[in-house]
Image: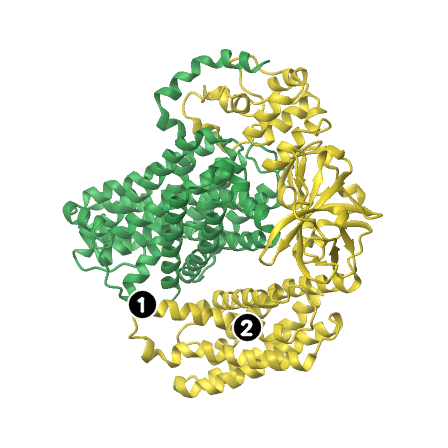
Amino acid sequence: MWRRWVLLVSAGELAGFCVPGVLGALTAEMSSGTQLPILVFAGIIEGAALGGAQALVLRRVLPKFRSTAWVVATSVAAGFAWLLGMLPSATQATWSTWPTTWVVVAATLLGAVLLQSIGTAQTWVMPAGIPSAHMWIWWTALGWCAGLGAFTVVAPPLWHEGQSPAVIALIGAAGGVAMAVAMAAVTGVGMVRLCARAARLHSGNRLEGSRVLSSIVGTPVRSAGGKDEGRVRDLLIDLAGGLDRVPVTGVLVGGGGRTDRVVAWDRLHDRGSYWVLDPIAPGDVVETGSTDVLIRRDILDSPVVLADPPCRARVSDVVLELVDGRAWLTGLDISTAGALRRMLGRPVVPERAEQVSLAKVHLVSAPAHSAQLAVPDAMVYRLEAQAMAEVLTRVPVPHARDILRVADPDVLDSALPLLHPHVLDRVTGAGLAPRRTRRLAGWRMHRPYRRGKQAPAPGQPHPNSSGPQAER
Amino acid sequence: MSAGTTTARREPRRVPRRAWPLLAVLGPGLLAGLSDDDPAGITTYSVLGTDYGYQLLWVLLLSTLALMVFHDLGARLGVVTGQGLIGLVRHRYGVGISAGALVALVTANLGTATAEFAGIAAGSELLGISRYVAVPLSAMLVSWLVLAGSFHRVEHVLMALAAVFVAYIAAGVLAHPDWSAAFAGLVTPRMSFGHQETLIVAATVGTTLAPWGLSFIQSYAVDKKLTTKDLGYERTDVVVGAALTGVIGFFVVVACAATLHRRGLHIDSAADAAVALTPIAGDLAGTLFALGLIGAALLAAAVLPLSTAYSICDFTGSEAALDSTFSEARTFYLSNVAITAVAAGVVLIPGIPLVTLLVSTQTLNAILLLPLLVLMQRLSRDHILLGDHVVSRGWATVQAILVVAVFACVALLLL
């Protein structure tokens, strides 16, 4: 849908932009007051072209979409936006005498209203039932920021005094193309996200099978009587239940001005487009323990460290398995593609081979790190020396010190000599500066020695760098 | 080997740290601060001094204070969370906002890196070296520094490059300024709110507090593996770095105010200032100014692509370390080299409107600065992330006031 949107909306906007472009050139010698109504009229036509192109895409993906209303709303809003855009030049004689502060405030307000005008009008005529439809206002504002920015970067620098009309028009067209494509690309991301969410709700949020966290967060929650209780904001897991399949024990419900509260997972029931929450008695809330972790807050988008292969990564999404009303966290998606899919509003469950078990990573966020150390089957308790050295090198220093306190001393005895001297100094708390300045320790990972390589004798250079030993 | 054994083995090396606590912490703050004195910054300070004499020096003082506050905050966020700025934004505010910030940051950094190479081109041509020789050589030099894989060498070279900023101090002294007027301008806020004046004030704030500097200092503090115990030292480093940035800016303004402003001259760039200084303050002052310009540009041209590469890897979560091989940190190296190559290449395109490009970049930097400052300000009060290290209410209020002030400056710049 995104590609279709970019193609059609860019073309529509470019075609529409020709009208104010041509009329603007023809009326360039006229006064601002005369230009104003002409360009507002041109803006209405531009809006119609833009709205028409958008409607071509949306009528295929949004049920009950009203094309005519959409085109009219876009057209009127575009005319209004042109009116606002022309106001500064038409009223320059008035505001040029204002104090600078007033001008700043007025310009900020004017810009904000201008950017939100088309999105607001279109949101009014959007089909009912699209969750977070108001976000479309911000997406259009962002899209027009990108579009106007692209035009500013391309056209004005190339326009010079004395150019022929053909060259001026050509440069303007190039600017128009850049503007249209940038605007369409950004608004396309927003519309794809809204449509994806609408489609999910239309088909129902079935609590069965494999799902990713990002497709669950945001689901509306209602009481049995239909009262709005907020949205699903996060899921609570208990690492003590096993790291290969971590049971989901609670749901954080809230938002929309309500206080967030954690309710037991089994209190929620699937009703298709929303979840129903059982009546909760006062004080009947889930108590969180030392092994509990909130997935969205502590795992999603946070860094993780892997021992095999040794590397750092970032969690793009979290895979959940939902069976018979129960749920488990079964894997992590740490690919960059997963993040891009989320950004485009199309989160999908990655293939099993692409998922990483929670048992094979160390979570870097502070609450998750502590929770992992509190369970006996955490990765750091099962590592051999080389892998331990790799992990200690990559986790933040305070985390490494925590691991040193709880890990198997025999493994540590073998792992610590493998650490780069700088890392060893930091994580053991011996914290001694290199001879010259401690700044020399910066900006390097200081990889551990590879097994098979002999650790250097004191005074000999480290095989992984020409640095610290030689510096001394 | 136990920790105790390690302690015993390394005991003798405690002495230097105790003896040279300040030297021991110099690094992130110093490089981040001094890199802000890039050609765009030098140009802005030169125009400030040439057009307004000592009158607007107080703006520089306030910008320096803002630099201290937000660089300190960046270092704190990095040290406590162990994540760079873009990574932290992704962790806390999701992939959408962080991706937007990353795209804007990379775009702005690319433009700024182009400005740095344009500064190298201008400075080298002042010394009679063609840009078609100087720019490719500089690009290869900074790329080689990175690809050589030895950070301590890179950092030594960068610190040596930073030393050329002494040239500006020398140029300022050689210009025989009126020190009492300079001091009065520094501590007496005066402004008539004319259009050009507000523009240069906004530009001064914008060029001193750059978005890439904020992301750079945080990544650097992370990679240096500093801990919360180092926060006090790190603050010293930040304050020293920001203060030096302000001092260098001060001497650039003073040099131009004492010579070009007194004669009623006008300049459009730092290169103009170097040319104009020569007949007034002597060959040495002009040459020093040109050398300073090249050194500043080289320093920033080396740091900027690195900073950008770190931000990209911070977002994706990929490995990013100068001692990694190419296959281990492909994204890091490719983005670094790509930024350098594109920026240098753009400068060499004949007839490219560099001034417009640089102004657009400054504008983009200014726009990007606002959301980054707001995000940092919010992160600084996030108990989940920072725990006991959240900034106090009073300090948060200072930050908020500075954000509003910067917002006003950016609005003025965009009008």
Q: Nearer the viewer, residue B387 or A93?
A: B387
**Residue A241 appears anywhere in the view:** yes
Mark 1 crowdedness (10 Å alpha carbons): few <14, some 14-19, many ≥20: some
> Which residue occupies the foreground of this view, B334 or B1?
B1
The picture places residue A243, in percent across and down from the top left corner, at 74, 34
State left or right for residue B189 relative to residue B380: left
x, y percent for residue B332 = 58, 42
> In the orientation shown, which residue stands out farthest toward the right?
A324
* Residue ID for mark 2: A176
Apparent side of residue A239 relative to residue B379 in the rendered image (left or right): right
Q: Quadrant of the N terminus of chain A?
A: bottom right
Residue A147 position within the rendered picture, expressed as x and y whole percent measured from the top left? 54, 67
In the figure, the shade used to draw chain A is yellow
**Chain under callout 1:** A
Label 2: which secondary element: helix
Report the amino acid beneath label 2.
Answer: Gly
Disc 2 sits on a residue from what chain?
A
Q: Nearer the viewer, mark 2 or mark 1?
A: 1
From the image, state the color of chain B.
green
Q: Nearer the viewer, residue B406 or B300?
A: B406
**Quadrant of the rendered structure where residue A124 is?**
bottom right
Residue occupying image coordinates x 53% and y 33%: B148
Instruction: Looking at this view, name the residue that lies furthest to the front.
Output: A282
Per the rendering, the mark at residue A472 is none
Q: Which residue is located at x 68 percent, y 76 percent? A: A55
Which residue is denoted by mark 1 in the rendering?
A100
**Viewed as shown, does residue A83 lie left or right of A402?**
left
User: Which image quarter holds the C terminus of chain A?
Assistant: top left
Local packing at callout 2 (Cα closer than 10 Å; few below 14, some 14-19, many 20+) is many
* Residue A243 in view (yes/no): no
Q: CA distance from mark 2 to mark 1?
A: 32 Å
SS assignment at label 1: helix
